[in-house]
Amino acid sequence: MRPQLENVCREIEKVIAGKRGVIEKILLALLADGHILLDDVPGVGKTTLAVCLGRAAGIRYRRIQFTPDVLPSDIVGFSVYEKESGTLRYHPGVLGGTNLLLGDEINRASSRTQSALLEAMEERQVTVDGVTRPTEKPFLVIATENSVGTAGTQPLPYAQLDRFLMRLTLGYPDYAAQMTMLKERQGKDPMDDVRCVLSAEALTAMQRETQAVTAKDAVLDYIIRLAEASRRHEAVAVGISPRGVLFLDRAAKAKAYMDGRDYVTGSDVAAVFHDVCAHRVLVREGAGAAPSRVLDELLRTVETPDRHMFGNGTKR
């Protein structure tokens, strides 16, 4: 892993122990300029992880706790008529001046409020009263939802799920991680020790370098064949969308960049395939197959690019 990213990982691990794999995937999504949905039971550290990322990466972050009474204007802002000037004055919502937005328990907001995020997530802008304003650069949404205590919640529609680059699960920490967590919190808060080791400008530059990573036609062909195979699968009602194809390409480039390469291999695509595509595959009712099993089958049956096609890449 590149030294700058390794430093961010180490800072986050001061607070979140035993979850190196998930932390790396979140950094990968950040490089790919994509959003993340953390779906897990309460209390495993979803919110804490997002706060640590904001501090370590040196980006401005804000948090909004989604509840049924949160309004779209709380997200995108609103305009107020000023009698003195005779004009409308814009008051930014939580998106204003934010690089990292933590949407806590997004499934507790109404569908109307959830949809207020869609323009910002997809087009990196918000429109209020006919005026469009760009979001900050970089811009990342980390949304959390709980898989228990769902009474009164609003499940995310497929169109919104499809806008998240990755859907991740933290899971419970193992015994050693829990012991570390308890020891480090005896009389102090390890969050106070998290240092800023990156900056918004440096992160934006790394995103540009990630975008410049080369994906040869053989890799692009592999991505398309995986997507088309998902749509033809007998157990699948809705396969990988065209947006999913684009996101898979971006995530594979980020994986290559993290590993210090300026070219993508089929192995990069396979490494990110589950995290990018599992929430985009809807299986038929009664098919008896989970999305993860379908994706495993696709990786086994869809031919990968020839290994010799990637021999000319260089380390950077």
Image: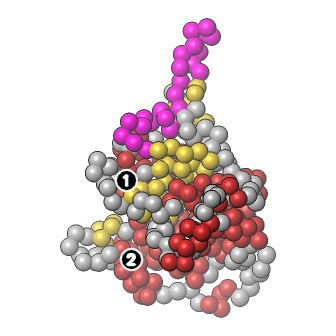
The residue positioned 41% from the left and 74% from the top of the image is: 228
Q: How far from the left and from the top, in percent, is residue 53?
A: 63, 58
Q: Is residue 299 left or right of residue 11?
A: left
Residue 216, percent from left and from top: 64, 77
In terms of secondary structure, where does tag 1 sit? loop
Magenta span includes 75:
yes
Look at the numbered discs 2 and 1 and tell me whether their residues touch, using CB distance below 8 Å.
no
Q: Residues within 10 Å of mark 1 (few under 14, many from 20)?
A: some
Q: Residue furthest top?
A: 84
Q: Indicate the colouring scheme.
A: secondary structure
Q: Which residues are magenta?
A: 66-89
Q: Amino acid at mark 2?
A: Ser
Quadrant of the snapshot with the C terminus? bottom right
The CA distance from mark 2 to mark 1 is 19 Å
Task: Indicate which disc residue 292 carries.
Answer: 2
Q: Position of residue 203 (x, y in %)?
A: 72, 58
Q: Magenta stretch containing residue 246, yes or no?
A: no
Image point (46%, 77%), residue name: 225
Position of 243 compared to 92: left or right? left
Mark linked to residue 156: 1
Residue 156 higher or lower than 240, as above or below: above
- Looking at the image, the residue that sits furthest to the right is 316
